[in-house]
Amino acid sequence: MVTLKSLIYRKRLWWSAILFVLLIAGGCRTDAASGDPAAVLEMDNNSGVDLSAAGAENSSSGGYPSKVSVVPGESLDFHISNGYSAKYTLSIYREGATRELMGTIPNVSTANYGCSGGYARGCNWPVAAGFRVPNNWPSGIYTVDIPRSGGSAMKTLFFVRAPKPEARILFLTSINTYQAYNDFGGGSLYGFGLAEKSERVSFNRPYMYGIGFLDRWEGKFVTWAEKAGYKMDYAATYDLEFVPNLLDGYDLVIIAGHSEYWTYDMRQRVKSYIYNGGRFMNLSGNTMWWQVRFEDNGRTMVGYKSWRNDPEKSAELSTDVNWDRPIFDSSFTITGLHWPYGGYPGGNGDGYYVINAGHWLFQGTGLKENELFGKGASRDDSIHDKESDGLAFNCATDGSTILGPIAGTGTPGNFTILGLTPVAGKQRKLNGLAMMGLYTTPSGGAVFSAGTTGWVLGLQQSAVDRITRNVMDRFLAGNFPQEPAAPDSNYLFADRFNCDALNRDRFSAQITDAARLNYITTAKVKGATLEQSCGVDGAGLLLPATPTGMRFVAGLGPNWGSTPKLYSRLYLNLKDLNVKNGSILTLVQQYADNRVEAPVAVAALQIGMINNTLSMRYQPVGGAEMPWVPVPANSFFRVDTTWDAGQNKVGFRVNGNQGYEQSVNLGVFPQPNRADFGILVKKGTSGGRLCMDELIYDDQSITAPVFATGP
């Protein structure tokens, strides 16, 4: 009987299929030139969603294994719904350099069972066939062909792990992402089209398209690597949760494609592996963005995508983005990159512009500085296809040369940036840059991050092939030098405001949001630009004083940790700022932000016209009034502030001498972990603009180079 519920569900599937076709055929703009950040896939979800993944198979047929992975000698069951009228044979293949038939299961008999509404509880189909994996089967990605009466065979997927390392490389497939996007049974963690948006998805249902995104990403790497002669063992990222020693004994671990969904323990095991000397290749984009957890012995994946809605509130079990409360474990600290600092590439795909062409990674490629590589004819053969990651960074005084990361965000201080490309960021609503690079650890560990979902799509291009081989070969041999620390890696946060010419000799599109790139979020910053005429060393930040105000938000550490000592340094030129007598402006506001309630203001760096004299002070919010210190009205000057809760001391200095140190009981104040800057003025009290340059926050006295000030 055809019920109303089944008709509604079929309609949902029909709309999902239509959505998928439209998105692939024309869901992205293609009228902009390569490198133009305006040429992006239009999105309507703020979670780093790849809408072209939407769609579902006919939910009345398919198959799924009872286990994600097994070792040789173990058994698993295949649960199949299939209207094939006669008995049939399942064919099991190992995916690799070629697709190799490994075995068959004859005389399988099944019926159609349906799975409407089974996205969370599972389809719970009966066992169609049991299978014991032979002891001599090699580790690999295995697919099962399920014949049907018309059309090509359906497929399902499982992994054979090595009981102990048989190769030096372990390749992990990101099936958690497969399940997050999988709307088989009428729902997913997204709710594309008319499918339900769920907090739970089941492994007791077929993967979308039978084998998830294997053909799109990971399968391409496996074919390339095995043809190139690399011997690898295989498992799923999922297995990191249930096999705690999975990485032991491997010299190199690789992920590829779209490795978005990780549990807390999965990340910790990779982190431990790296810092104990392991080498990790992250050929993925949007990597480690959402934290999930497993229930029902690993057969249910939970992802509320909001700790407030999740009954589990702990860092280990809550399901939300990993960089914020309550998890506080940013992917910056593992991969060096982070999805909010990247975004979506051009609609036709894109490549990387070479940075540090003399690095060993580029040996044998013939690539020159700022040369574009990895760009194919379309998104389907370009290394930037869907989602790309980035980081906060500084530039030299020429406005174009990349100095390295701002390490206070969590990126390791010796992460060497080796490529960049313009992208459009959804999370921070700005046009920015995706980046690739690598870092090393003192123990001999190393991480290469390609920073894009599509890296493996470019493996047929000679430069991408050579770079990938260079990294694999060097990582396997342990033949790589320690990467040098970036110039600003020893500070909590430092912005030189120099990156005003990022497109020079690279791409035609201007990075109009360059002033905003290094901040977690910005608000109402129209008119804030990087200008050579506004800097004390290279470019500086031109900051308008507007009645609506503006805000640049910087965390003082990768995971919102507070500091009992906070020192700051910046350079200011107020010659174009108009302040009425008796008016006070706040330029910098330091907060204690627990990421739950509204942040608590701790201290403010203020500008005032006091008795017709332009002055500044550093004021604990709610504390005793600090004295005003006259400042130059027509030239650059240096400002240093001190917050020292251990010594109960607050300090403010102009050009290193004029100012004060005051004893204040800072024990009654919360400790800062966030610093915002921008000018909020009351209408009619002030106007104009100011120049800011060389902003530094640190937890110890700042000894950065001192730049000349004065007329």
Image (cartoon, rainbow, N blue to C red):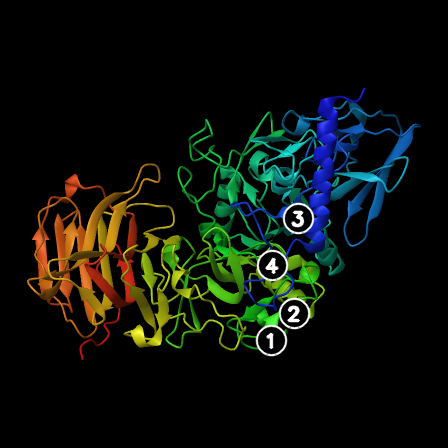
Left or right: where 195 falls relative to 303: right
Quarter of the image with the N terminus in it: top right
Q: Quadrant of residue 402?
A: bottom left
Quadrant containing the C terminus in the rendered view:
bottom left
Marks 4/2: CA–CA distance: 20 Å
Mark 1 residue element: loop
Task: Pick the residue in front: 251 or 433.
Answer: 433
Look at label 4 and name its amino acid.
Leu
Percent position of residue 617, x then y: 14, 58
Which marked residue is nearer to the observer: mark 4 or mark 3?
3
Query: SS for tag 4?
Result: helix
Circle 3 residue: 52
The residue that mark 2 highlights is: 463
Question: Which residue corresponds to mark 4?
Answer: 476
Where 208 sits versus 480, above or below?
A: above
Q: Do the CB atoms of the residues marked 1 and 2 lie less than 8 Å apart?
A: yes
Q: Mark yes or no: residue 202 visible.
A: yes
Q: In the rendered structure, which disc, 1 or 4, sits on the residue that comes first in sequence?
A: 1
Give the farthest residue toward the top: 1
Circles 2, 3 touching at the beta carbon (< 8 Å): no
Are the residues flagged by discs 1 and 4 in contact, CB closer than 8 Å?
no
Whichever of labels 3 and 1 marks the residue nearer the N terminus, that label is: 3
Residue for badge 1: 367
Tell me if mark 1 has few (under 14), some (14-19) or many (20+) residues whose alpha carbon lies within 10 angstroms of its own: some
Which of marks 2 and 4 precedes in the sequence? 2
The span from disc 2 to disc 3 (Cα, nearest Å) is: 27 Å
Q: Nearer the viewer, mark 4 or mark 2?
A: 2
Which is more N-terminal, label 3 or label 2? Answer: 3
Instruction: Measure how far apart labels 3 and 1 are at the Cα level.
Output: 32 Å
Question: SS for tag 3?
Answer: helix
